[in-house]
Image: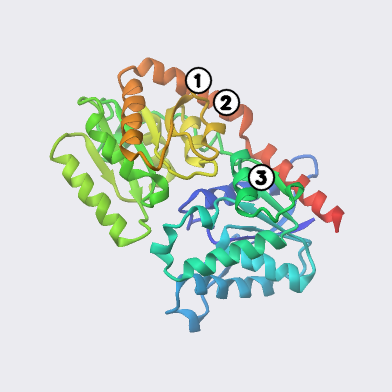
């Protein structure tokens, strides 16, 4: 079985959950034991890679809208996919490549739904008119796909709500996973200190991109209500727009005039620094307003850290409320109430580090048992087999 995986992100250019998913899924597919391993060709965006075929933006589209550039890359990828048995695309950036390859080469196309454009209207701020193109590309690919893989049960419900024309039998649930060896408790106070964070002080940690989806502004609004002796660490970069980056910069600067221990790390840290930072946190906070599953919460749990998160999308499938962390209801119409809830739940664990540690240990145990990549790879291969048999 020769599979063509199409993705915008591939190491070292991984900045979001979809890229993490693809990286680990491919590794697991290639190393399934017992002769089950799958032959995988990876096609990604960007410069040359040693372990994937990379495709640059066509020169004539260098100054075009980002969505048009993506479609231009997709055309080249589709041409390069001749000879595969099945194409599997990830995110709207790559969906058109999968669709075109399916049409031209006569092979099945599987789409993994990591997010949905109609659920992210703020992307228009980033893509301009390209948001209409990205929405069209996603819709066209989903409706034509032989199968759609949702990364959570909540995401499956979302897919069918947004695209009711889809046959529910074609929408499968294969949850995201985490590499529990790469993400494990690593206690290294020196690494944490080197990042400008006091490892001897309890701190709450946020890790994510600066985008409306991740809800960082709500956490910043909650910060004044956190215990005065607690730190707040924001590992946040890759802003969608300059305006969003400036909004966060202004809020952080203002917060730092009122309380100490507020640290903003404006970069995506390498794993050898990120893992000790997560491990050292008393509580990991995920204030997302939209999250199909939330790999970052799995990573935090794998590091043995308790999680406080919004009860949206697939997050309740990851955070076992009261056992591995605490959930906070989110109501778009009541941002102040959401901020107060974040502060209260995060404050509970900051004030009770023993309870937080017990939740972290339970989270680690659950991740190892339920979210391993080998099992996820096997479930994905089963989807491939069903689709190929149906052809």
Few, some or many residues within 10 Å of mark 1 (<14, 14–19, 20+): some
Q: Nearer the viewer, residue 174 or 217?
A: 217
Residue wearing tag 1: 323
- Farthest left residue in view: 257
Q: Which quarter of the rendering shows the C terminus?
A: bottom right
Check whether the beta carbons of the residues at disc 1 and disc 2 lie within 8 A of each other.
Answer: yes
**Residue 157 appears in which quarter of the rendering?**
top right
Residue located at (18% from left, 46% from top): 253
Residue bearing the label numbered 3? 28
- Quarter of the N terminus within the rendering: bottom right
Q: Is residue 354 above or below residue 377?
A: above
Callouts 2 and 3 close, C-beta under 8 Å: no
Task: Give the CA separation, mark 1 to mark 2.
Answer: 10 Å
Q: Is residue 122 visible?
A: yes
Disc ID at residue 366:
2
Judge from the rendering whether residue 153 lies leftward or rightward of residue 340; answer left or right: right
- Above or below residue 107? Residue 324 is above
Helix, strand or loop under label 3: helix
Q: Is residue 157 above or below residue 346?
A: below
The local secondary structure at tag 1 comes to: loop
């Amino acid at each position: 079985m020769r599979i063509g995986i199409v993705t915008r992100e591939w190491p070292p250019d991984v900045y979001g959950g979809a890229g993490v998913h693809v990286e680990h899924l491919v590794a697991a597919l290639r190393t399934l034991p017992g002769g089950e391993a799958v032959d995988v060709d990876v096609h990604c965006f960007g410069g040359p890679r040693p372990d994937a075929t990379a495709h640059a933006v066509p020169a004539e589209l260098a100054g075009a809208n980002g969505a048009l550039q993506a479609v231009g890359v997709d055309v080249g990828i589709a041409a390069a996919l001749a000879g595969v048995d099945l194409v599997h695309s990830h995110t709207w950036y790559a969906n058109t490549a999968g669709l075109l390859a399916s049409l031209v080469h006569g092979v099945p196309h599987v789409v993994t739904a990591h997010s949905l454009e109609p659920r992210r209207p703020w992307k228009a701020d980033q893509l301009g008119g390209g948001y209409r193109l990205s929405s069209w590309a996603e819709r066209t690919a989903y409706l034509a796909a032989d199968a759609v893989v949702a990364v959570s049960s909540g995401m499956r419900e979302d897919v069918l709500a947004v695209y009711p024309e889809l046959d529910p039998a074609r929408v499968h649930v294969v949850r995201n996973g985490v590499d529990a060896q790469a993400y494990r408790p690593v206690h290294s106070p020196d690494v944490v200190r080197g990042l400008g964070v006091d490892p001897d002080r309890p701190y709450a940690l946020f890790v994510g991109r600066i985008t409306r989806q991740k809800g960082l502004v709500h956490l910043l609004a909650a910060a004044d209500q956190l215990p005065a002796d607690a730190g707040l660490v924001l590992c946040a970069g890759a802003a969608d727009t300059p305006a969003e980056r400036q909004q966060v910069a202004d809020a952080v600067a203002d917060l730092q005039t009122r309380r100490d221990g507020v640290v903003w790390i404006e970069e995506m840290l390498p794993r050898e620094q990120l893992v000790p930072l997560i491990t050292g946190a008393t509580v990991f906070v995920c204030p997302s307003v939209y999250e199909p599953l939330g790999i970052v919460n799995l990573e935090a749990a794998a590091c043995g850290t308790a999680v406080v998160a919004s009860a949206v999308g697939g997050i309740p499938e990851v955070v076992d409320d009261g056992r591995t962390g605490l959930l906070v209801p989110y109501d778009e119409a009541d941002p102040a109430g959401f901020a107060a809830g974040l502060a209260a739940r995060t404050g509970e664990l900051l004030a009770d580090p023993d309870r937080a540690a017990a939740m972290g240990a339970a989270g680690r145990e659950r991740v190892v048992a339920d979210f391993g990549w080998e099992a996820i790879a096997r479930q994905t291969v089963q989807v491939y087999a069903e689709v190929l048999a149906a052809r």
